[in-house]
Image (tube, rainbow, N blue to C red):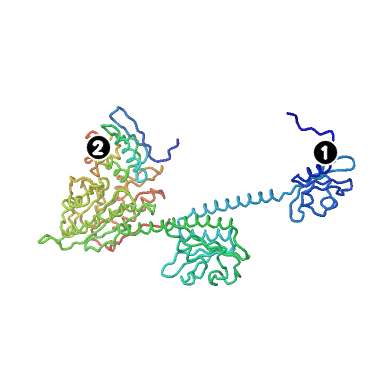
Amino acid sequence: MTGIRNVSTPPPTHLLHAVLDAAADAVLLCDDQGAILLANAAARRLMPGLTSIGELTDDPDSFEREWHGRPLRGRRQPVDEGHHVWTVHDCTDEHARAASLAAERERTAFLAEASRRLSASLHRGRCVRTTVELAAAHLADAAVVVLPPSRHRVEWVRALTGSRFETGVMRERDADGVPGLSEALAGFPPVPSRWLDPAQVPGSLLPADFGEIGALLVTPLPGNGVPAGALILARRAPGLFSEMEELQARIFAARAGAAISAAVLYQEQVETTGILQADLLPPELPRIEGLELAGAYRPAKDAARIGGDFYDAFPRTPSLAPGADPAETMVVLGDVCGKGPKAAVLAGKVRQTLRALRLLEGRPDPLLRVLNQALIDPRDRSRFVTLALASMVRDGDGWRVTVASGGHPPPLILRASGGVEPVLARGTLIGVSSTITVETADVTLGPGDLMLLYSDGLFEARGGAGGREAYGEDRLADSLGTCRNMPATAVVERLEQLVSDWINGAGHDDIAMLAVRVPPRVPDYGNGHHHAVNLRRAR
Amino acid sequence: MIDDSPLRIDVSHPDPATALLSLAGDLDFDTAEELVDEAERALITEIRTLRLDLSGLYICDSSGLSALLHIHHDAREVGTDFEITGVTAQLRRILEVTGLDAVLGTTPAEAHS
């Protein structure tokens, strides 16, 4: 095959013109003064009426400029002494491609930024505010999020470009006046923007000084099955949202809807957990004649992970068993395995069961065995509770106490003399095995003696110099030894403080304590009242 | 591979009829599920004994004890022996207090040595 070579005899002129006219770029033949001698079809189309290249450029070599709304790029090539050729390229398409690429990048960047900011919070209100602020900054002059109606009212949150968000409530009737809104809130596919008449929008939707709405877009915020609300975008400039803008708004709305509904779910979960946890919160301790009671409960830091520590105190009550002795004063402190709602449910079950059972059987040993049978769940042999319970009978100015432990750390007694001793009650944890051992212990509490029931979170608390050492039973006993002659309330506060210093802000399991003290013969500065100290402190 | 879980479980077979799960780190609310899953994987194989070596455990909370109970129960269901070794002094104290030593049938040498 031979390559292209110049023909020795030039083709006829009309063919040469045809060749030139076939070129996509403009071709101009000019003399040394710049006068145009010949222009091909593209040149006549791009630069009609042009007679001299000087009208386009003074530059001898090349130019880039707008000409009648078109971006042109030209280059000069000399031909001979008196002539040169200018080729001129129309850059309209390239510029449009670059602009659309830049716009696409900007849209992607916006959506990425939106996703990042929307997923930064699990707070519904914050997600909604972020939604309107982002939309007002990037998509329109004003953005309004309307939340699903409840009791014929709708809450709205709106923002104008460059100003802070505002919130309010409107009647559902008024909201229905916004074109496309009721459809969006009902979860119907969005009505195309061009069908929405901005003039129909009720005045209350946007601030009075916003002015005329030129263009309107209403899009649902998709949620889990039910919409999380709707997003309304308004622009002052008349005209329509372009197809691309509409698509972007919908993608943004989908992400915002997902973030808002995730926040709603989380909130519902927290509320549910809260309801369950109410059964675990320290109860109001009853007043019991001749005893000081003080409880402390410090839940693990993680709010979503309620733990399973609980305590209760029951005053002496008539028994429900015919002819039986009254149900004696009883205190109990327990710990359910695990955390979260499951633990809360089990703890609630334990407390309710105990509350009822003690009216039929007040002796700790059989009571624990019955409780164990009641709690065994053949479907789940891994859920258990450990607890220490004490049945107390007044005896002169002291109390006779029978302590039973269902797999729980032994209660400690701080004697009025300052000595600390464990109560040697032992037993198997409750709710797992149908055969359990229970070894009760009988102790006497005299005036000034204090018995402490506590959960293992207390001595398992890790901290110290290395931050990983357990507080430990010995340290707990030593700490209790420093509380001689203190009222029950002061003792639990002091122990809590000591453990808190030990942990030094680190995470910990639940910590629960219940101190029972026989008032001393000589009145001290304790008033003998009973307090439940909630140790949830702001840190 | 970087393992960022606070519990490491190494599975080995000292002999063909035994699966040994060696634990290191924290057996607690966040990791108990992992151990139960790993034990269940071992229990569906043809082993006669499932042994847990707890000597590397740093923390074992109530969820950890619950996991041990769970595995103990699962092993009994499929007729596999379940053994616990390497019980540290701290863990032994917890097993004693809760009475779990008797429930799990940890060998007398382990429970009272």
Q: Residue at x 43, y 70 (%)?
A: A152
Left or right: A429 with respect to A139? left
Residue A355 found in image quarter? bottom left
Kind of element beneath mark 2: loop
Quadrant assignment for the N terminus of chain B = top left
Tell me where residue A261 appears, x and y as whole percent.
44, 57
| Type of the residue with mark 2 | Val
Distance of label 2 from label 1 (alpha carbons)? 97 Å
Determine the residue located farthest toward the left in the rendered image. Answer: A323
Foreground residue among A415 and A34? A34
Residue B69 numbered mark, or none: none
Tell me where residue A32 appears, x and y as whole percent.
89, 45
| Type of the residue with mark 1 | Pro
Q: Residue at x 60, y 58 (%)?
A: A242
Foreground residue among A265 and A275? A265
For disc 2, the marked residue is B78
Q: Nearer the viewer, mark 2 or mark 1?
A: 1
For disc 1, the marked residue is A11
Residue A77 found in image quarter? top right
Query: Residue under mark 2: which chain is it in?
Result: B
Tell me where residue A536 appears, x and y as whole percent.
37, 57
Query: Residue under mark 1: which chain is it in?
Result: A
Foreground residue among A310 and A1? A1
Label 2: how many residues lie within 10 Å, few (<14), some (14-19) or many (20+)?
A: few
Left or right: B41 with respect to A91? left
Same subunit, tags 2 and 1: no
Foreground residue among B82 and A139? A139
Quadrant assignment for the C terminus of chain B = top left
Tell me where residue A146 appears, x and y as whole percent.
49, 65
Kind of element beneath mark 1: loop
Label 1: how many residues lie within 10 Å, few (<14), some (14-19) or many (20+)?
A: few
